[in-house]
Image (cartoon, rainbow, N blue to C red):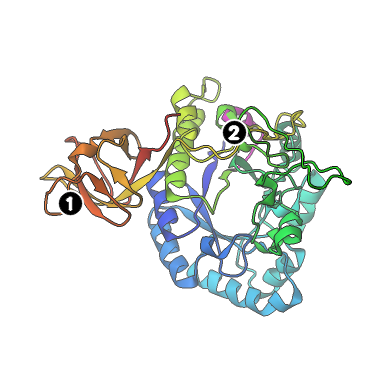
Amino acid sequence: MERPELLIPAGNLEKLRTALLYGADAVYVGVEGLSLRAHQAEFNMGELATGVREAHQKQVKVYAALNIFARDRDRQLIVQRAGELAEIGVDAVIVSDPGIVRLLRQNHPQLPLHLSTQANTTNAEAVRFWLEQGVRRIVLARELSLVEVAGIKAAVPEAELELFVHGAMCMAYSGRCLLSAALTGRSANRGECTHPCRWEYALVERTRPNEPLFLEEEAGYSYLLSSRDLRMIEYLPQILAAGVSSLKVEGRMKSAYYVAVVTRTYRWALDAACENLTGYACRPEWLAELDKVSNRGYTTGFYFGEPKDAALNPGHSYRQSHGLAGTVLRYDVPAQRILVELRNRLTAGDETELLLPEQTVPLDSTKMTDEEGKKLAEGHNSYRVYFPVPAGLEIPAGAVLRRRITGD
Ligand code: SF4
Protein backbone atom coordinates (compact mmCIF):
# COMPACT_ATOMS: atom_id res chain seq x y z
CA MET A 1 0.00 0.00 0.00
CA GLU A 2 1.21 3.47 -0.90
CA ARG A 3 1.97 5.42 2.31
CA PRO A 4 -0.37 8.41 2.15
CA GLU A 5 0.70 11.88 3.17
CA LEU A 6 -0.65 13.94 6.04
CA LEU A 7 -1.46 17.39 4.64
CA ILE A 8 -1.76 20.25 7.11
CA PRO A 9 -3.01 23.84 6.71
CA ALA A 10 -0.46 26.59 7.28
CA GLY A 11 -2.05 30.03 7.55
CA ASN A 12 1.29 31.78 8.09
CA LEU A 13 4.98 31.07 8.53
CA GLU A 14 4.64 30.31 12.24
CA LYS A 15 1.94 27.73 11.56
CA LEU A 16 3.98 26.23 8.74
CA ARG A 17 6.90 25.77 11.13
CA THR A 18 4.53 24.27 13.70
CA ALA A 19 3.24 21.79 11.12
CA LEU A 20 6.84 20.81 10.25
CA LEU A 21 7.69 20.33 13.91
CA TYR A 22 4.71 18.10 14.68
CA GLY A 23 4.94 15.76 11.73
CA ALA A 24 3.25 17.03 8.56
CA ASP A 25 4.25 15.37 5.29
CA ALA A 26 2.96 18.35 3.34
CA VAL A 27 1.42 21.76 4.02
CA TYR A 28 -0.83 24.00 2.00
CA VAL A 29 -0.72 27.75 2.07
CA GLY A 30 -2.58 30.72 0.68
CA VAL A 31 -1.08 33.14 -1.80
CA GLU A 32 -1.69 36.85 -1.41
CA GLY A 33 -4.90 37.91 -3.10
CA LEU A 34 -5.60 34.61 -4.83
CA SER A 35 -6.57 31.94 -2.32
CA LEU A 36 -9.89 31.14 -0.74
CA ARG A 37 -8.90 32.52 2.64
CA ALA A 38 -8.87 35.96 4.13
CA HIS A 39 -5.71 38.01 4.01
CA GLN A 40 -4.56 37.05 7.50
CA ALA A 41 -4.18 33.46 6.26
CA GLU A 42 -2.04 34.25 3.23
CA PHE A 43 1.70 34.35 2.60
CA ASN A 44 3.55 37.03 0.75
CA MET A 45 6.15 35.75 -1.68
CA GLY A 46 9.10 36.42 0.63
CA GLU A 47 7.54 34.46 3.48
CA LEU A 48 6.59 31.69 1.13
CA ALA A 49 10.14 31.37 -0.21
CA THR A 50 11.37 30.99 3.38
CA GLY A 51 8.63 28.48 4.18
CA VAL A 52 9.35 26.38 1.09
CA ARG A 53 13.08 26.34 1.85
CA GLU A 54 12.52 25.21 5.44
CA ALA A 55 9.92 22.63 4.43
CA HIS A 56 12.12 21.13 1.72
CA GLN A 57 15.00 20.82 4.20
CA LYS A 58 12.70 18.42 6.07
CA GLN A 59 11.43 16.73 2.88
CA VAL A 60 7.99 18.27 3.44
CA LYS A 61 6.03 19.42 0.39
CA VAL A 62 4.34 22.80 0.04
CA TYR A 63 1.21 23.35 -2.02
CA ALA A 64 0.05 26.88 -2.80
CA ALA A 65 -3.66 27.60 -3.08
CA LEU A 66 -4.58 29.72 -6.08
CA ASN A 67 -8.17 28.61 -5.87
CA ILE A 68 -10.31 31.70 -6.25
CA PHE A 69 -13.00 31.76 -8.87
CA ALA A 70 -11.27 34.32 -10.99
CA ARG A 71 -12.62 37.33 -12.84
CA ASP A 72 -10.95 38.56 -16.00
CA ARG A 73 -9.34 41.37 -14.05
CA ASP A 74 -7.41 38.72 -12.03
CA ARG A 75 -5.66 37.29 -15.09
CA GLN A 76 -2.45 39.28 -14.96
CA LEU A 77 -1.93 38.73 -11.25
CA ILE A 78 -2.56 34.98 -11.61
CA VAL A 79 0.06 34.56 -14.33
CA GLN A 80 2.53 36.70 -12.39
CA ARG A 81 2.01 34.83 -9.12
CA ALA A 82 2.23 31.45 -10.85
CA GLY A 83 5.60 32.46 -12.26
CA GLU A 84 6.77 33.46 -8.79
CA LEU A 85 5.49 30.18 -7.33
CA ALA A 86 7.37 28.19 -9.97
CA GLU A 87 10.54 30.10 -9.13
CA ILE A 88 10.10 29.60 -5.40
CA GLY A 89 9.73 25.86 -6.04
CA VAL A 90 6.32 25.04 -4.57
CA ASP A 91 5.46 21.40 -5.14
CA ALA A 92 2.02 22.06 -6.59
CA VAL A 93 -0.59 24.75 -7.07
CA ILE A 94 -4.17 24.16 -5.91
CA VAL A 95 -6.73 25.47 -8.39
CA SER A 96 -10.51 25.39 -8.80
CA ASP A 97 -11.27 27.49 -11.82
CA PRO A 98 -10.99 25.87 -15.29
CA GLY A 99 -9.79 29.22 -16.60
CA ILE A 100 -6.88 29.21 -14.18
CA VAL A 101 -6.08 25.60 -15.10
CA ARG A 102 -5.87 26.65 -18.75
CA LEU A 103 -3.82 29.76 -17.99
CA LEU A 104 -1.31 27.83 -15.91
CA ARG A 105 -0.99 24.98 -18.41
CA GLN A 106 -0.21 27.54 -21.11
CA ASN A 107 2.11 29.80 -19.15
CA HIS A 108 3.73 27.57 -16.53
CA PRO A 109 3.34 23.96 -17.68
CA GLN A 110 6.03 22.80 -15.26
CA LEU A 111 3.81 23.60 -12.25
CA PRO A 112 1.95 20.50 -10.98
CA LEU A 113 -1.75 21.22 -10.47
CA HIS A 114 -4.03 19.91 -7.75
CA LEU A 115 -7.74 20.42 -8.24
CA SER A 116 -9.37 22.01 -5.19
CA THR A 117 -12.41 20.53 -3.48
CA GLN A 118 -14.14 23.73 -4.63
CA ALA A 119 -14.35 22.18 -8.08
CA ASN A 120 -16.83 19.65 -6.62
CA THR A 121 -15.44 16.53 -8.26
CA THR A 122 -17.85 13.70 -7.50
CA ASN A 123 -17.40 11.01 -10.17
CA ALA A 124 -14.83 9.04 -12.15
CA GLU A 125 -15.63 10.76 -15.47
CA ALA A 126 -14.94 14.14 -13.90
CA VAL A 127 -11.65 12.80 -12.53
CA ARG A 128 -10.70 11.56 -16.02
CA PHE A 129 -11.66 14.92 -17.48
CA TRP A 130 -9.39 16.79 -15.09
CA LEU A 131 -6.49 14.37 -15.64
CA GLU A 132 -6.85 15.04 -19.37
CA GLN A 133 -6.51 18.75 -18.62
CA GLY A 134 -3.13 18.09 -17.04
CA VAL A 135 -4.23 18.09 -13.39
CA ARG A 136 -2.15 15.72 -11.29
CA ARG A 137 -4.25 15.36 -8.14
CA ILE A 138 -7.94 15.71 -7.36
CA VAL A 139 -9.22 16.85 -3.97
CA LEU A 140 -12.57 15.08 -4.00
CA ALA A 141 -15.78 16.71 -2.84
CA ARG A 142 -16.53 16.23 0.83
CA GLU A 143 -20.04 15.11 -0.06
CA LEU A 144 -18.92 11.68 -1.33
CA SER A 145 -19.19 8.46 0.65
CA LEU A 146 -16.09 6.31 1.13
CA VAL A 147 -17.72 3.65 -1.05
CA GLU A 148 -17.95 6.22 -3.85
CA VAL A 149 -14.36 7.31 -3.26
CA ALA A 150 -13.19 3.69 -3.53
CA GLY A 151 -15.27 3.30 -6.71
CA ILE A 152 -13.59 6.33 -8.28
CA LYS A 153 -10.13 5.01 -7.42
CA ALA A 154 -10.99 1.58 -8.84
CA ALA A 155 -12.27 3.18 -12.05
CA VAL A 156 -9.31 5.56 -12.43
CA PRO A 157 -6.42 3.85 -10.61
CA GLU A 158 -3.87 6.31 -12.00
CA ALA A 159 -5.64 9.23 -10.25
CA GLU A 160 -3.99 10.72 -7.19
CA LEU A 161 -6.84 11.43 -4.76
CA GLU A 162 -6.91 13.72 -1.74
CA LEU A 163 -9.61 13.70 0.91
CA PHE A 164 -10.46 15.88 3.88
CA VAL A 165 -10.23 13.98 7.17
CA HIS A 166 -10.60 16.72 9.76
CA GLY A 167 -11.94 20.23 10.22
CA ALA A 168 -14.87 22.51 9.56
CA MET A 169 -17.58 21.61 7.06
CA CYS A 170 -19.77 23.97 5.07
CA MET A 171 -23.53 23.70 4.95
CA ALA A 172 -23.16 24.75 1.34
CA TYR A 173 -21.82 22.40 -1.32
CA SER A 174 -18.07 22.41 -0.68
CA GLY A 175 -18.07 26.09 0.10
CA ARG A 176 -20.03 27.31 -2.93
CA CYS A 177 -22.08 29.68 -0.89
CA LEU A 178 -23.37 33.20 -1.16
CA LEU A 179 -24.61 33.57 2.41
CA SER A 180 -21.65 35.64 3.54
CA ALA A 181 -21.72 37.78 0.39
CA ALA A 182 -25.47 38.33 0.83
CA LEU A 183 -25.38 39.22 4.52
CA THR A 184 -22.06 41.01 4.86
CA GLY A 185 -20.87 41.79 1.34
CA ARG A 186 -17.83 39.55 1.86
CA SER A 187 -17.75 36.62 -0.53
CA ALA A 188 -16.76 33.08 0.45
CA ASN A 189 -15.76 32.56 -3.14
CA ARG A 190 -13.12 35.25 -2.76
CA GLY A 191 -11.84 33.85 0.52
CA GLU A 192 -13.63 36.30 2.77
CA CYS A 193 -16.36 34.20 4.37
CA THR A 194 -17.61 35.72 7.61
CA HIS A 195 -19.23 32.36 8.56
CA PRO A 196 -22.83 33.52 8.93
CA CYS A 197 -23.93 29.87 8.84
CA ARG A 198 -22.49 29.71 12.35
CA TRP A 199 -24.54 32.62 13.67
CA GLU A 200 -27.70 32.20 15.68
CA TYR A 201 -31.03 32.60 13.90
CA ALA A 202 -34.60 33.00 15.15
CA LEU A 203 -37.99 32.16 13.63
CA VAL A 204 -40.21 35.19 12.94
CA GLU A 205 -43.90 35.12 12.01
CA ARG A 206 -44.52 37.78 9.37
CA THR A 207 -47.32 39.67 11.15
CA ARG A 208 -45.49 39.64 14.50
CA PRO A 209 -42.01 40.86 13.64
CA ASN A 210 -41.37 41.88 17.21
CA GLU A 211 -41.94 38.40 18.55
CA PRO A 212 -39.03 36.33 17.30
CA LEU A 213 -39.05 32.72 18.35
CA PHE A 214 -35.72 31.58 19.66
CA LEU A 215 -35.25 27.84 19.18
CA GLU A 216 -33.25 26.92 22.19
CA GLU A 217 -31.57 23.58 22.63
CA GLU A 218 -30.32 22.31 25.94
CA ALA A 219 -27.28 24.55 26.01
CA GLY A 220 -29.54 27.56 25.42
CA TYR A 221 -28.47 28.02 21.80
CA SER A 222 -29.43 26.74 18.40
CA TYR A 223 -27.11 27.08 15.46
CA LEU A 224 -29.62 26.06 12.83
CA LEU A 225 -27.43 26.40 9.76
CA SER A 226 -24.12 25.35 11.21
CA SER A 227 -22.41 22.01 10.70
CA ARG A 228 -20.37 20.00 13.12
CA ASP A 229 -16.71 19.49 12.29
CA LEU A 230 -15.35 16.52 10.42
CA ARG A 231 -13.25 14.00 12.38
CA MET A 232 -12.17 10.77 10.70
CA ILE A 233 -9.34 9.65 12.97
CA GLU A 234 -11.35 6.60 14.05
CA TYR A 235 -11.74 5.46 10.45
CA LEU A 236 -8.28 5.77 8.92
CA PRO A 237 -8.20 2.15 7.69
CA GLN A 238 -11.37 2.78 5.67
CA ILE A 239 -9.86 5.98 4.23
CA LEU A 240 -6.65 4.20 3.29
CA ALA A 241 -8.52 1.22 1.85
CA ALA A 242 -10.38 3.62 -0.45
CA GLY A 243 -7.03 4.38 -2.13
CA VAL A 244 -6.50 7.95 -0.97
CA SER A 245 -3.00 9.42 -1.44
CA SER A 246 -3.34 12.44 0.82
CA LEU A 247 -5.25 13.02 4.06
CA LYS A 248 -6.09 16.69 4.40
CA VAL A 249 -6.83 18.73 7.50
CA GLU A 250 -8.93 21.86 7.08
CA GLY A 251 -8.16 25.13 8.86
CA ARG A 252 -5.78 27.76 7.53
CA MET A 253 -7.51 30.27 9.80
CA LYS A 254 -6.95 28.13 12.91
CA SER A 255 -4.26 28.83 15.52
CA ALA A 256 -0.74 27.43 15.79
CA TYR A 257 -2.00 25.54 18.84
CA TYR A 258 -4.66 23.87 16.70
CA VAL A 259 -2.04 22.99 14.08
CA ALA A 260 0.24 21.46 16.72
CA VAL A 261 -2.43 19.28 18.30
CA VAL A 262 -4.16 18.12 15.15
CA THR A 263 -0.90 17.44 13.30
CA ARG A 264 0.72 15.33 15.98
CA THR A 265 -2.47 13.43 16.79
CA TYR A 266 -3.10 12.48 13.17
CA ARG A 267 0.62 11.73 12.78
CA TRP A 268 0.42 9.20 15.60
CA ALA A 269 -2.78 7.72 14.22
CA LEU A 270 -1.68 7.56 10.59
CA ASP A 271 1.63 5.93 11.52
CA ALA A 272 -0.25 3.36 13.58
CA ALA A 273 -2.69 2.69 10.72
CA CYS A 274 0.13 2.30 8.19
CA GLU A 275 1.99 -0.08 10.54
CA ASN A 276 -0.99 -2.32 11.11
CA LEU A 277 -4.03 -1.55 9.03
CA THR A 278 -6.17 -4.43 10.19
CA GLY A 279 -5.19 -4.06 13.84
CA TYR A 280 -5.72 -0.29 13.93
CA ALA A 281 -7.70 0.99 16.88
CA CYS A 282 -8.14 4.67 17.50
CA ARG A 283 -6.86 5.36 21.01
CA PRO A 284 -9.09 7.24 23.49
CA GLU A 285 -6.26 9.68 24.22
CA TRP A 286 -6.19 10.72 20.55
CA LEU A 287 -9.88 11.56 20.70
CA ALA A 288 -9.28 13.42 23.94
CA GLU A 289 -6.54 15.46 22.25
CA LEU A 290 -8.90 16.48 19.45
CA ASP A 291 -11.44 17.59 22.06
CA LYS A 292 -8.82 19.99 23.41
CA VAL A 293 -8.86 22.18 20.30
CA SER A 294 -11.62 24.44 19.02
CA ASN A 295 -14.46 22.36 17.61
CA ARG A 296 -18.24 22.45 17.17
CA GLY A 297 -18.88 18.81 17.90
CA TYR A 298 -17.69 16.12 15.52
CA THR A 299 -19.25 14.19 12.65
CA THR A 300 -18.13 11.76 9.94
CA GLY A 301 -19.89 13.97 7.39
CA PHE A 302 -20.98 12.13 4.25
CA TYR A 303 -18.35 9.38 4.33
CA PHE A 304 -20.74 6.70 5.57
CA GLY A 305 -23.72 7.93 3.54
CA GLU A 306 -25.95 10.98 3.75
CA PRO A 307 -25.80 12.19 7.34
CA LYS A 308 -29.28 11.72 8.75
CA ASP A 309 -28.85 14.58 11.21
CA ALA A 310 -27.23 16.54 8.37
CA ALA A 311 -24.42 16.87 10.90
CA LEU A 312 -26.36 19.83 12.20
CA ASN A 313 -25.14 21.52 15.22
CA PRO A 314 -27.94 22.68 17.50
CA GLY A 315 -26.63 23.54 20.91
CA HIS A 316 -23.01 23.26 19.85
CA SER A 317 -21.23 26.55 19.74
CA TYR A 318 -17.44 26.47 19.58
CA ARG A 319 -15.94 24.44 22.38
CA GLN A 320 -12.38 24.57 23.46
CA SER A 321 -11.04 23.28 26.77
CA HIS A 322 -7.41 24.33 26.18
CA GLY A 323 -5.66 27.16 24.42
CA LEU A 324 -2.25 28.41 23.39
CA ALA A 325 -0.13 29.57 26.34
CA GLY A 326 3.13 30.25 24.54
CA THR A 327 5.90 28.89 22.35
CA VAL A 328 9.41 27.76 23.22
CA LEU A 329 12.13 30.16 22.11
CA ARG A 330 15.11 28.23 23.46
CA TYR A 331 15.97 25.17 25.53
CA ASP A 332 18.70 25.91 28.04
CA VAL A 333 19.91 22.33 28.47
CA PRO A 334 22.48 22.80 31.29
CA ALA A 335 20.00 24.82 33.39
CA GLN A 336 17.15 22.43 32.50
CA ARG A 337 14.76 25.20 31.66
CA ILE A 338 12.98 26.57 28.62
CA LEU A 339 12.61 30.20 27.60
CA VAL A 340 9.03 30.74 26.46
CA GLU A 341 7.28 33.63 24.78
CA LEU A 342 3.80 33.83 26.24
CA ARG A 343 0.94 34.28 23.80
CA ASN A 344 -1.83 34.71 26.34
CA ARG A 345 -2.24 35.54 29.98
CA LEU A 346 -0.90 32.76 32.17
CA THR A 347 -1.40 32.72 35.92
CA ALA A 348 0.74 30.77 38.35
CA GLY A 349 -1.27 27.64 39.11
CA ASP A 350 -2.82 27.38 35.64
CA GLU A 351 -2.69 23.82 34.33
CA THR A 352 0.06 24.07 31.73
CA GLU A 353 1.54 21.48 29.37
CA LEU A 354 4.41 21.38 26.92
CA LEU A 355 3.51 19.63 23.67
CA LEU A 356 6.38 17.70 22.13
CA PRO A 357 6.03 15.77 18.89
CA GLU A 358 5.92 12.45 20.74
CA GLN A 359 4.62 13.31 24.20
CA THR A 360 2.96 15.82 26.49
CA VAL A 361 4.93 17.12 29.48
CA PRO A 362 3.12 18.76 32.42
CA LEU A 363 4.79 21.98 33.58
CA ASP A 364 4.51 23.62 36.98
CA SER A 365 3.30 27.15 36.24
CA THR A 366 3.92 28.19 39.86
CA LYS A 367 7.63 27.92 38.98
CA MET A 368 7.35 30.38 36.09
CA THR A 369 9.99 33.13 36.39
CA ASP A 370 10.94 36.22 34.47
CA GLU A 371 14.25 36.42 32.62
CA GLU A 372 16.00 37.56 35.81
CA GLY A 373 14.79 34.48 37.66
CA LYS A 374 12.10 36.26 39.72
CA LYS A 375 8.92 34.22 40.30
CA LEU A 376 5.88 35.50 38.44
CA ALA A 377 2.30 35.36 39.72
CA GLU A 378 1.07 36.18 36.24
CA GLY A 379 2.49 36.57 32.75
CA HIS A 380 0.95 38.26 29.71
CA ASN A 381 1.12 38.09 25.94
CA SER A 382 4.71 38.60 24.68
CA TYR A 383 6.30 38.16 28.14
CA ARG A 384 9.46 36.07 28.04
CA VAL A 385 9.46 33.61 30.91
CA TYR A 386 11.34 30.54 32.06
CA PHE A 387 9.92 27.16 33.08
CA PRO A 388 11.96 24.35 34.62
CA VAL A 389 11.67 21.11 32.63
CA PRO A 390 12.48 17.48 33.45
CA ALA A 391 15.85 16.12 32.30
CA GLY A 392 16.32 13.96 29.25
CA LEU A 393 13.91 15.66 26.87
CA GLU A 394 14.50 16.95 23.38
CA ILE A 395 12.72 20.30 23.21
CA PRO A 396 12.80 22.09 19.87
CA ALA A 397 12.30 25.82 19.46
CA GLY A 398 8.72 26.46 18.37
CA ALA A 399 7.25 23.74 20.61
CA VAL A 400 3.85 24.81 21.92
CA LEU A 401 2.67 25.25 25.51
CA ARG A 402 -1.03 25.01 26.26
CA ARG A 403 -3.13 25.89 29.27
CA ARG A 404 -6.51 24.64 30.39
CA ILE A 405 -9.11 27.35 29.93
CA THR A 406 -12.28 25.56 31.05
CA GLY A 407 -13.20 22.79 33.41
CA ASP A 408 -14.37 20.52 30.53
S1 SF4 B 1 -21.24 30.84 5.31
FE1 SF4 B 1 -20.88 28.82 6.15
S2 SF4 B 1 -21.59 27.41 4.54
FE2 SF4 B 1 -21.27 29.40 3.59
S3 SF4 B 1 -19.13 29.33 2.80
FE3 SF4 B 1 -19.11 30.29 4.84
S4 SF4 B 1 -18.63 28.56 6.24
FE4 SF4 B 1 -19.37 27.67 4.28
What residue is disc 1 on?
370
What residue is disc 2 on?
297
Q: Residues within 10 Å of mark 1 (few under 14, many from 20)?
A: some
Q: Which residue is located at x 71 percent, y 29 percent?
A: 304
User: Does the closest atom of ligand 1 sit within 8 Å of the Cβ of label 2?
Assistant: no
Q: Which residue is located at x 54 percent, y 69 percent?
A: 85
> Which quarter shows the C terminus?
top left
Q: Secondary structure at mark 1?
A: loop
Which quadrant holds residue 190? bottom right
Q: Nearer the viewer, residue 78 or 255?
A: 255
Q: Nearer the viewer, residue 377 or 198?
A: 377
Quick check: 307 left or right of 321? right
Which of discs 1 and 2 lies nearer the camera? The answer is 1
Q: Which residue is located at x 78 percent, y 42 percent?
A: 211
Q: Which residues are magenta?
A: 236-245
Counting residues from the start of the chain, the first of labels 1 and 2 encountered is 2
Q: Position of residue 83 (x, y in %)?
A: 58, 75
Query: Does residue 30 sit above or below 137 in this rendering?
Result: below
Amino acid under label 1? Asp
Q: Position of residue 320 (x, y in %)?
A: 48, 38
